[in-house]
Image (tube, rainbow, N blue to C red):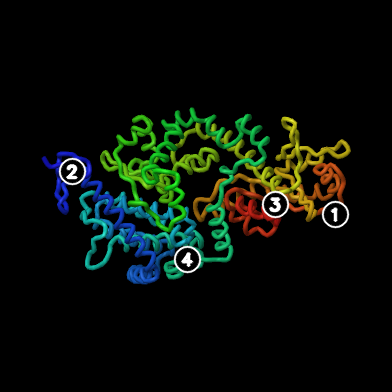
């Protein structure tokens, strides 16, 4: 009796190149081929970027010729974007829904891996947004519209998939330009062909990229062992905070973070059976060990966690179950599991990134409502956010202390540990900070004779150009950050000798004061506000480490 060459099933579906294949294995094989083909086509679109852009220009010119320039600019832009989206739609229906989803996940997984290997390029990073748009357009296509050609096949000698990618890039560029210009003093031609750039915007994205690719403050490990011991016993480190709310996560989402992490670990083991394999991969130039995506049965994941937990994880991270409930295309980046009947398709590092982001949203309360809206959850996470704000301050103090800066210290288990959130400095019986608030971190560079006053703000990161331009500013203005920093600096400067003595326990003259605003997430307004000395967490660790604050 003939059996499947891959799984030994007797339910033979096809004979391919002399090998018998069952229906399920044939489906998997087709998915793998779609993944490989879409990767190759995406690479072509990157390598021939300028040539492809010239082709898109021709499409744009044709659309513009049919738009009445007597209409309001916002009406013209709406017509243009609708026409572009319709063009993307027409190119995607050449394939099947299944293969387009697989192609999108392949591109996203490729980008994750390139970033992990420090291949940082905005052209590449921006394609995450392009994949989100492709997902959204795909979800709007009716099943009977698809022509079911495989990814990699050509129509009239051209790839519809490459064209769809390039059109999606241009759609996003135009939409982003609209947000940055607010439709003011522009014509269609001003925003259709290249990104709107200013020195301020370029500086923001440069610093954003650096901060995004560096260690996050939530991942910072306290260096002072006694301080670390104290925080762990008090349940004030990110790891212990997450443990404390495991029941809340289970109640709200139906799974435990350990379930997600166990799945991530097992997926990694499929690709990298040993730690040596994993380490060797990151030292090599190759992006994939086998194929870009992992395709497995749901029953295989049910061996890692319970069926109930897996269902809850799919409810949270499945593209199929979430794509219709999100109007903001960028939110689709947070869903990385694709279900095709009893099969699950996933990118190793894409899913790991989603779980990582989910954990950070839990700790910071940032955008957790994308996954679930719950008043009880929000209330609980507000308390967690306050704990994390304290952790950021003590992490900054610990790092400064480890690099030789002098800080206020306190005794713990007969050893001295650095302090943060200085709320009282008494001078001649007078509370120095009574009218200007706490100093989040107070530090001294003895060599350069500088007293540093750190103001730390654990702001929610901007998720759009609008938030970058307006909410970043309002957050700082509403908190009166600038006024408070100036007031605190004046008070310390007026009492500089006593403040130095408070830290060093003896008088030293000749010190000056420098206030620094530190935010874990990049803030556009702070970057461009000349009156503020501003650092992201990545810049802080770099400059403090080199004693160049």
Identify the residue under disc 2: 4
Q: Secondary structure at mark 3?
A: strand
Q: Nearer the viewer, residue 505 or 388?
A: 505
Left of 429 or right of it: where is 285? left
Identify the residue under disc 3: 516
Q: Secondary structure at mark 4?
A: loop
Left of 438 or right of it: where is 272? left
- Tell which circle, 2 or 1, labels the residue nearer the N-terminal end: 2
Q: Residue visible at 27% across and 38% down?
A: 342
Confirm or deny contact between disc 4 and disc 3 (CB under 8 A). no
Camera-nearest label, 4 or 3: 3
Q: Residues within 10 Å of mark 4 (few under 14, many from 20)?
A: some
Identify the residue under disc 1: 510
Q: Residue furthest left?
A: 1
State the separation of the CA atoms marked 3 and 2.
66 Å
Camera-nearest label, 1 or 3: 1
Camera-nearest label, 1 or 4: 1
Identify the residue under disc 4: 195
């Amino acid at each position: 009796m003939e059996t499947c060459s891959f799984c030994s099933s007797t339910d033979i579906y096809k004979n391919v190149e002399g090998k018998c294949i069952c229906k399920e294995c044939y489906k998997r094989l087709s998915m793998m081929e779609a993944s490989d083909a879409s990767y190759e086509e995406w690479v072509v679109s990157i390598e021939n970027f300028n040539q492809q852009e010239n082709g898109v220009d021709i499409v744009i010119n044709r659309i513009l010729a049919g738009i009445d320039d007597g209409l309001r600019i916002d009406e013209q832009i709406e017509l243009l974007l609708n026409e572009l989206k319709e063009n993307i739609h027409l190119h995607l229906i050449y394939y099947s829904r299944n293969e387009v989803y697989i192609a999108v996940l392949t591109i996203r997984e490729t980008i994750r891996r390139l970033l992990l290997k420090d291949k940082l390029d905005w052209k590449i990073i921006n394609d995450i947004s392009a994949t989100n748009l492709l997902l959204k357009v795909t979800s709007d296509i009716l099943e009977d519209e698809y022509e079911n050609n495989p990814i990699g096949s050509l129509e009239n000698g051209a790839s519809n998939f490459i064209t769809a990618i390039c059109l999606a890039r241009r759609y996003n560029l135009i939409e982003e330009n609209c947000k940055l210009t607010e439709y003011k003093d522009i014509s269609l031609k001003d925003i259709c062909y290249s990104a709107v750039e200013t020195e301020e915007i370029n500086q923001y994205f440069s610093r954003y990229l650096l901060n995004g690719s560096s260690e996050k403050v939530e991942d910072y490990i306290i260096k002072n062992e006694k301080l670390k011991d104290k925080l762990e016993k008090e349940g004030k480190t990110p790891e212990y905070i997450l443990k404390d709310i495991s029941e809340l996560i289970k109640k709200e989402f139906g799974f435990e973070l350990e379930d997600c992490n166990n799945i991530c670990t097992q997926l990694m083991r499929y690709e990298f059976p040993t730690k040596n394999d994993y380490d060797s991969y990151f030292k090599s130039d190759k992006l994939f060990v086998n194929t870009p995506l992992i395709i497995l049965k749901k029953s295989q994941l049910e061996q890692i966690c319970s069926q109930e937990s897996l269902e809850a994880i799919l409810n949270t991270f499945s593209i199929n179950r979430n794509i219709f409930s999100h109007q903001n295309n960028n939110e689709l980046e947070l869903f990385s599991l694709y279900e095709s009947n009893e099969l699950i398709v996933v990118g190793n590092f894409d899913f790991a990134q989603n779980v990582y982001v989910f954990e950070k949203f839990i700790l910071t309360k940032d955008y957790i409502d994308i996954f679930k809206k719950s008043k009880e959850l929000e209330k609980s996470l507000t308390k967690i956010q306050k704990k994390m704000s304290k952790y950021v301050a003590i992490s900054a103090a610990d790092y400064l202390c480890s690099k030789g800066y002098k800080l206020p210290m306190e005794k713990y288990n007969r050893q001295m540990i650095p302090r943060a959130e200085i709320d009282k400095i008494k001078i001649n019986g007078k509370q120095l900070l009574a009218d200007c608030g706490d100093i989040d971190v107070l530090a001294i560079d003895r060599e350069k004779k500088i007293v540093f006053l750190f103001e730390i703000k654990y702001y929610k990161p901007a998720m759009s150009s609008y938030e970058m331009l307006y909410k970043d500013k309002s957050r700082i203005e509403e908190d009166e950050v600038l006024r408070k920093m100036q007031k605190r600096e004046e008070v310390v400067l007026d009492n500089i000798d006593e403040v130095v003595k408070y830290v060093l326990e003896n008088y030293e003259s000749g010190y000056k004061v420098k206030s620094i605003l530190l935010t874990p997430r990049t803030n556009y307004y702070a970057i461009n506000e000349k009156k503020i000395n501003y650092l992201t967490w990545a810049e802080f660790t770099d400059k403090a480490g080199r004693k160049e604050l």
